[in-house]
Image: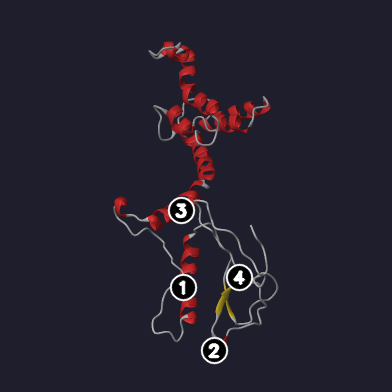
Amino acid sequence: MSLHHRLMIHGSGPNTTDNRRIGVVIRYISPHIRKPNEVRDYGVPMRGNCDRGNFTLCSPPKGLFHPENLLNYQKIGEDQAQVMMAGAKANTAMYSYMDHVKFRAMTDGDAADYAFLTDHEVAHAKGTASRLLKALVELDEGLSGYQITRLDHSLQSATRAERDGADTDWIVSTLLHDIGDIFAPYNHDEYAATILRPFVREQCSWVVEKHGDFQMVYYGQHVGGNPDKREI
């Protein structure tokens, strides 16, 4: 990363990666500065009293790709484009903006469409942990009949792993090993292992996937199952 004043002479070699080169420009100015012809620009107040009437003040972003911020971004771009293109014979967009792909059938998508979707997928994936913790809490209202809930059982198991000196992969796997009970009660172990597999090492995801076979030793003989299934 290069961090420099905009007037400093700078340059770099060609981008030889598969990723885009991204430039971010941040301008700090005093609120008494204004554009000519009574044009109001946009700004995020950083400190002090910024309400001099020269800018439309914006709140900081609420999150990555937040719908409200995307709409604000589009409006700001349109307003700034009108200023930049003032006097021109034809107006144009200042930024190329997408809020959804252009295609209805995936075979019709182009590089811009799939780059847009990739960005959204990356942002969505970053929220996986929060969604899993929410699902974990819902285990408190899951399968009943035991003396404790599935959430209690999951917390007890993870606590035992932590007290035993287990690493993060083991603790996370133990905490979430029954997460599949909500949506996949008949193969909850495979369901949980599939969710965990991209994030923990194979040893841990394998144990989660097979833990249903191992626990048959306690009750398999009572329900017509094979108590020795773990030997396979």
- Is 138 located above or below residue 30 in the figure? above
Residue 75 on image: x %, y %: 46, 72
Disc number lying in front (4 or 1)? 1
Report crowding for label 4: few under 14, some 14 to 19, many 20 or more residues within 10 A (C-alpha). some
Asked which secondary structure carries label 1, the reply is loop
- The amino acid pointed to by label 2 is Asn
Label 2 and label 4: CA atoms lie apart by 22 Å
Residue 7 on image: x %, y %: 66, 73
- The amino acid pointed to by label 4 is Val
Label 3 and label 4: CA atoms lie apart by 25 Å
Label 2 and label 1: CA atoms lie apart by 20 Å
- The amino acid pointed to by label 3 is His
Q: From the viewer's side, name the closer residue of 123 and 58.
A: 123
Residue at x 48% of width, y 30% of height: 193
Residue at x 52% of width, y 24% of height: 207
Asked which secondary structure carries label 4, the reply is loop
- N-terminal of the pair, mark 2 or mark 4, is 2
- N-terminal of the pair, mark 4 or mark 1, is 4
Q: Name the residue under label 4.
A: 44
Label 3 and label 2: CA atoms lie apart by 39 Å
In which quadrant will I find the C terminus?
Answer: top left
- N-terminal of the pair, mark 2 or mark 1, is 2
- The amino acid pointed to by label 1 is Met
- Residue contact between numbered discs 4 and 1, judged by CB atoms under 8 Å: no
Q: Mark 2 points at which residue?
A: 37
Residue at x 43% of width, y 65% of height: 97
Which disc is residue 120 wearing?
Answer: 3
